[in-house]
Image (cartoon, helix red, strand yellow):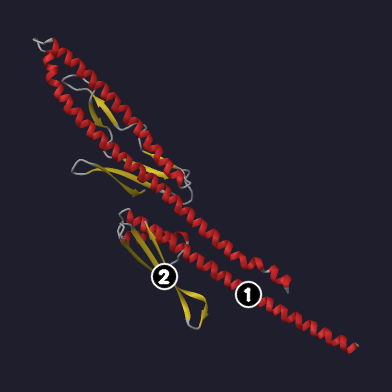
């Protein structure tokens, strides 16, 4: 009886440890995933708004370079994209239906470095 | 185990809620910008149209007024006939009434343009203030030196430039300028400029 009890106590502590480890793992995974989702959402919105402003400035007659500089300084001012961040690639053209299209793309490192995927590419275009 | 997973559920959902807020914020900012831009575009194109209408009316008035001078001189001459006098009075009356009508229609269109611009902004759930735009149309009537009729129209603002801004201003001010310019062919056209 006593031995049996002892065995059961040992079994319970092992189970708790196992469950706690699993929960810890899940929580850490959830946190990492959350951070990644927020990070990606941040990139998405930053690029989306930047491409909108870029296309708007181009449509209002500003030169490609000037529009780019102004949007870049705006991003710097708001802290959306700092100096050390990944490089942004800017392009603008007039579409077939006479609309100004501003396009920004970037390549940023993934938080979870998978064996065959170290970077994500994101492109956002805005027609103005 | 289940309780702990349930307790950690908000951690899973937190990022989705935060991302949604971020998207909504950017969407709202873009919508506000488009609202201000649309108000500016609407106002500028309507005002350019009004200026063109004014120019056309002015030319017509000038032609009619010059043509009226012959009858006026005939009526004021020493050998004035009854027919000349009658025609002169009728023409002067018609010109004055037309000038009054033109002034009234310009005033109505001027106000209508402002309301149309503000309604464009309201469509995008924002409100705009318009600065430097006179309350009345920037045209005035002068008196003709020959016949003293108040039908010599002229424009009082040389370079029409209005400022359309979001009202009340928020942390990121949205201001654009609408500029009316005259092309070499004499037509008014509008363009927007960032303020």
Closer-to-camera residue (B86/B181): B86
Q: Identify the subunit bearing mark 2.
A: A
Q: For the N terminus of chain B, give its image quadrant.
A: bottom right
Q: Quadrant of residue A83?
A: bottom left
Contact between labelled residues 2 and 1, with CB atoms less than 8 Å apart: no
State whether residue A100 is above or below residue B128. below
Whether residue B95 appears in this view of the structure is yes
- Nearer the N terminus, badge 1 or badge 2? 1
Q: Quadrant of residue B139?
A: top left
State whether residue B126 is above or below residue B61. below
Whether residue B166 appears in this view of the structure is no
Residue A87 location (% of width, % of height): 40, 70
Q: Which mark is residue A76?
A: none
Q: Is residue B47 toward the left or the right of residue B149 in the image?
A: right
Label 1 sits on residue: A28
Task: Please report the residue visible at 19 percent of the width from the left and 22 percent of the height from the top.
Answer: B144
Task: Please report the residue visible at 39 percent of the width from the left and 65 percent of the height from the top.
Answer: A104
Closer-to-camera residue (B25/B132): B25
Residue A71 location (% of width, % of height): 39, 60
Residue A3 location (% of width, % of height): 88, 89
Q: Which mark is residue A106?
A: 2
Residue A90 location (% of width, % of height): 36, 66
Q: Identify the subunit bearing mark 1.
A: A
Q: Secondary structure at mark 1?
A: helix
Task: Please report the residue visible at 52 percent of the width from the left and 60 percent of the height from the top.
Answer: B22
Q: CA distance from mark 1 to mark 2?
A: 28 Å
Q: Quadrant of residue A4?
A: bottom right
């Amino acid at each position: 009886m006593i031995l049996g009890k002892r065995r059961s106590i040992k079994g319970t502590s092992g189970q708790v440890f196992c469950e706690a480890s699993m929960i810890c793992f899940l929580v850490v995974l959830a946190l990492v995933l959350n951070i990644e989702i927020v990070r990606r959402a941040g990139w998405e919105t930053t690029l989306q708004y930047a491409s909108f402003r870029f296309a708007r400035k181009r449509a209002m007659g500003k030169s490609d370079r000037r529009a780019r500089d102004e949007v870049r300084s705006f991003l710097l001012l708001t802290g959306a994209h700092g100096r050390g961040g990944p490089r942004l690639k800017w392009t603008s053209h007039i579409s077939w239906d006479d609309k100004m299209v501003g396009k920004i793309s970037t390549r940023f490192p993934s938080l979870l470095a998978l064996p065959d995927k170290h970077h994500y590419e994101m492109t956002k275009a805005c027609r103005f | 185990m289940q309780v702990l997973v349930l307790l950690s559920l908000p951690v899973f959902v937190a990022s989705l809620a935060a991302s949604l807020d971020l998207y909504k914020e950017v969407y709202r900012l873009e919508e506000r910008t488009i609202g201000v831009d649309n108000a500016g575009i609407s106002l500028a194109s309507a005002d350019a149209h009004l200026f063109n209408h004014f120019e056309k009316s002015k030319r017509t008035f000038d032609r009619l007024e010059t043509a009226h001078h012959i009858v006026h001189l005939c009526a004021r001459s020493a050998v004035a006939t009854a027919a000349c006098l009658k025609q002169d009075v009728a023409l002067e009356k018609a010109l004055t009434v037309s000038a009054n009508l033109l002034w009234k229609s310009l005033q109505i269109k001027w106000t209508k343009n402002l309301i149309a611009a503000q309604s464009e902004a309201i469509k995008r759930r924002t409100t705009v203030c318009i600065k430097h735009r006179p309350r009345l149309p920037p045209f005035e009537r002068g008196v003709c030196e020959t016949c003293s009729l108040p039908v010599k129209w002229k424009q009082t603002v040389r370079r029409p430039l209005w400022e359309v801004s979001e009202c009340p201003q928020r942390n990121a001010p949205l201001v654009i300028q609408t500029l009316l310019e005259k092309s070499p062919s004499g037509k008014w056209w509008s363009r927007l400029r960032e303020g």
